Image (cartoon, grey):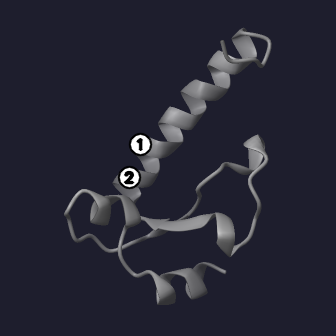
Amino acid sequence: MRAALFQRSPLCAECKRQGRVTAATQRDHIIPLAEGGADDETNEQALCDLCHDAKSATESKRGRWQKGQGGSKV
């Protein structure tokens, strides 16, 4: 799946959105599997290491917040 993604999308999707050109190195789930995202090409994007790390950190913080709030957002 990773090789097919990079063949279709060799550049980081987030960098492209911000006007940068960076090679993709990570297969990322747009909606994390832990939040109900599918493990297929409808829910994947190619990211560089920096963008993937930033997105993962945000998701981790969100997960910790939800656990502390009983899993609900207010």
Residue on which disc 2 sits: 51
Q: The residue under label 1 is which amino acid type?
A: Ala
> Closer to the camera, 39 or 3?
39
Q: Image height check: is 69 above or below 40?
A: above
Taking the view exactly as shown, the residue that stands out farthest to the front is: 74
Q: Secondary structure at mark 2?
A: helix
x, y (%) of residue 59?
Answer: 57, 36
Quadrant the N terminus occupies: bottom right
Q: Residues within 10 Å of mark 2 (few under 14, many from 20)?
A: some
**67 on left or right of 31:** right
Q: Secondary structure at mark 1?
A: helix
Residue on which disc 1 sits: 54
**Which residue does the image show at 30% across and 60% down from the upper left?**
17
Q: Image height check: is 52 above or below 59?
A: below
**73 on left or right of 20:** right
Q: Image height check: is 47 above or below 30?
A: below
Q: The residue under label 2 is which amino acid type?
A: Cys
Q: Residues within 10 Å of mark 1 (few under 14, many from 20)?
A: few
